[in-house]
Amino acid sequence: MATESAAKPQKFKAEVSQVLSLVINSLYSNKDIFLRELVSNAADALDKRRFESIAKPKLTPEGHEPRIRLIPDREAGTLTIWDNGIGMGKGALAKDLGTVARSGTKEFAKKLEEATQQAEQGELSLIGQFGVGFYSGYLVADSIDVVSRGAGSADAHRWSSDGQESFTIEATEREEPGTSVVLHLKDEQKKYLEEYELRNLVRTYSDFIDYPIELLVDRKGGDDDGDDDGDEPQGPHFESINRASALWTRPKSEISDEQYEELYKHLSHDWEPPLCRAHFSVEGTQMFTGLLFVPKRAPFDMLAPQGESEHGVRLYVRRIFIMDNCKELLPRWLRFVRGVIDSDDLPLNVSRELLQDSAIVRVIRKQVIRRVLDALGTVAKDSPEQYAVFWNTFGAVFKEGLHFDADQKDKIAPLLRYESSGSEGLTSLPEYVERMAEGQEKIYYALGPSSEMLLKSPHLEGLKAKDYEVLFMTDGVDQWAVEGLQEFGGKPLVTAMEADVDRGDDGKSEDADKEGGELSELRERCKQVLEEHVSEVRVSSRLTDSPACLVLPKGGLPAHLERMIRSYQQDLPTQKRILELNPSHALIKRMESVRADEPESDKLTEWIEMLYDQALLSEGSPLPDPTRFASRVATLMEQQG
Ligand code: ADP
C-alpha cells in the first residue's frame, strides 16, 4: 500500500468529496459500472497515446501493442486495471484525480446540488450526467492506488487514497508508460476477482472497446469442467475477452441494442440510454461511417457554449481516434448530438484549421444533419411522448437551425413543436394546418413569456373570435427562428402581436384610422397624452373583450424580449408601440362621451394614462409606476362608492 513513504496527504477539491459521497450513497445498487468506467478511461488513454504519436512517433516505440489488462490477485484482494496508454505525470495525477475532471464551473456545483436533492428524493438518474468515472472505483474498493507513468517520461508515480478526504502521491517505478488502477476490494466485493464475473461484465459493458481487453487467468489443468482440453494453456496467462473491433465498423445486424447503448454511455458519460441513434455508412467519392446518438436529457454541460463541453462527436480517421467534440462536424443547433464519425478520407494529421474549410467535412456535416433529422422524425412519428421529452429538453437549441441552416427548413419545420390555443400539449405545424378553420389562410403565432399569459392576452381576442388557432412561442430564440421559417406548406406565418395582423378581414374600413375617422378626436387626445410611449393610436379590429391593447409596429420587438435585451443592453432605444382601442367597449364609449363633453378634462387625461397601464398589465408587462396606478384605482373606487 501507499504509506511506506512520508508523502504528504493532499486534500481533494471540495466537489470531489461531494461526488465521492454521491457515488457511494447513490450508485450502490449498481456497483458493476465501476469496471465500465475504468476500462473506458483506459481506452481513452490508449486513444490519446495513439493520436499523440502521430505527431510524436517517439511516444510509441516499435512493437507497442495497445492493451487493457484486468489482473485479479486473490491473495492481495486486489483487481488491477492496467493499460499502456498515455499515462499521467505527477501533476496530472493530482489534477485529474484530485478534482472532478469536468468541473471548475459554477454550473457544475449548481447541478451537483440539484442532483443531490433529486438523489435524496430517490431519483438517481441525474447523477449519471456527471460521468463519475474514476471515482466509481470506490463503489467496490476501500482504497485505490493509481500507478502511472506518462508516455515519453521515465518517471512513475503512485497516487493513493481511501476516497475520504485526501490523497498522497509518491515516486515509484513502472516498467512501461501507462496506468494501473489498483482496487483494494472491499471484503464483500471479492466476487470481482472471479473470471466468470469479469468476463461477463466486459461482455456486457465494454465489448465494443476497440482495444484488446485481456484477463489474467490461471487454469490449473482440467479442474474447471472435468474435460481435459488439451490445447488450453495452463498456468497464469492473459486471454483476450472482448472482440476489440470498433462497434461502428460492424454490420448493424450484428449489434444489439445493449451494445449500442453501452457505446453511447462510454461516449457521452450519460447514465440513461439514448433517445435514438443513426448508424450509417456512406460510400462513393467519400467514405465514412457515422454512429450518432441523441440523448434523452441534457447532460449538465450540454448547453454550455460550444467548445466548452468535452463531448459531442468524436472524429476517427480509419479507426484511429483523432479528437473529441469535433464541432466542425456538427452544426451548432445539433450540439446535443453525441457519437462517432470515422472518415476514410481525412488525413491522420488533420488539424482544426484544416477541418474548418474541408470539402470532406462539409459532405460529412450534410449527412450528419440528414441522418439526425431522419432519426428524430422516426421518434416523432412512432413515439410522440418521447419526442415531447426531447423537445422540452432540446427544442430551444434545435430551433436555432431555422436561422443558421435556413436551407434545411423544410426538413426542420415538421419537427417543430409549439403549445397553442387550440391543442392540449404540443402541436406540430402539419397538425395545425390540418385544424385550420375555414377561410383561414395564415398560420398565426404569438410571442410572449408564457403560454398562460398569451392565452389571456388581448391580442388574440379577434383571432379567437374567428376560431383561428394561435401558436405560442415562448422561447427567447423563437423571434428570430420564426423569421427563418416564414412559411409552412405555402401558408405564411404571421404574428398576432403585430399591428397589421388580419386587419380588414372582417370588413372594417382602414379609413377608421385616418383623420376624421372613427374616434378620431379621442385617438388624437390619447396620442398627445401618451406621446412618450406610443407612436400611433388606432381603432382595433381584433379586440372583443378588452378595451385596449398595445401592438407592435411591423417587425417590432415583442415587449418581453425588449425587456430581456434591455436588461443587458441599457442603451436600447425605446420602441414605441401602437395603441389599439376597442370602439365597442363600454369604457372606450364612456371616454369618448367624456371627451365630447369636455375635451380638455383632466379626468380624461388620467383615464387615458390608466388605459395605457392596464394594456401593459393585460399583456404581462410591468408598469412604469405601479404605486401611482394603485392609488388611482383606489381613488376611482372611492368615487364609485
Ligand atoms: P472523465 O473520464 O470523465 O474525464 P474521470 O474521473 O474518470 O473523468 O477521469 C479523470 C481524468 O483522469 C481523465 O479525464 C483522464 O485525464 C485521467 N485518467 C483517468 N484514468 C486514466 C488512465 N487510465 N490513463 C490516463 N489518464 C487517466
Image (cartoon, helix red, strand yellow):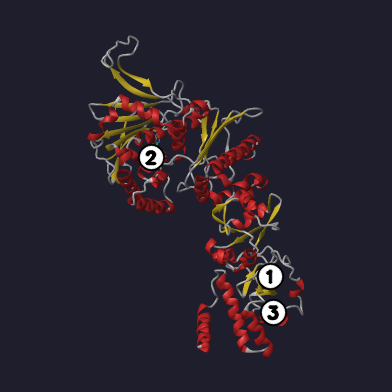
Residue sitting at x 66%, y 68% = 542
Q: Is residue 488 left or right of residue 121?
A: right
Q: Residues within 10 Å of mark 3 (few under 14, many from 20)?
A: many
462 over 386 or under it: above or below: below
Mark 2 CB lies closer than 8 A to ligand 1: yes
Tell me how far mark 1 sits from mark 2, CA to CA. Answer: 62 Å
| Quarter of the render that holds ligand 1 | top left
Q: Residues within 10 Å of mark 2 (few under 14, many from 20)?
A: many
Check disc 3 and report the residue beneath it: 523
Towards the viewer: 177 or 271: 271
Name the residue type under label 2: Gly
Precedes in sequence: disc 3 or disc 1: 3
Comparing labels 3 and 1, the label whose residue is closer to the camera:
1
Q: Secondary structure at mark 2?
A: helix
Check disc 1 and report the residue beneath it: 541
Using the rendered image of the protein, determine whether residue 393 is visible from the camera's viewpoint. Answer: yes
Mark 3 CB lies closer than 8 A to ligand 1: no
Q: Quadrant of residue 595?
A: bottom right
Using the rendered image of the protein, determine whether residue 450 is visible from the camera's viewpoint. Answer: no
Name the residue type under label 1: Ser
Q: Which mark is residue 133?
A: 2
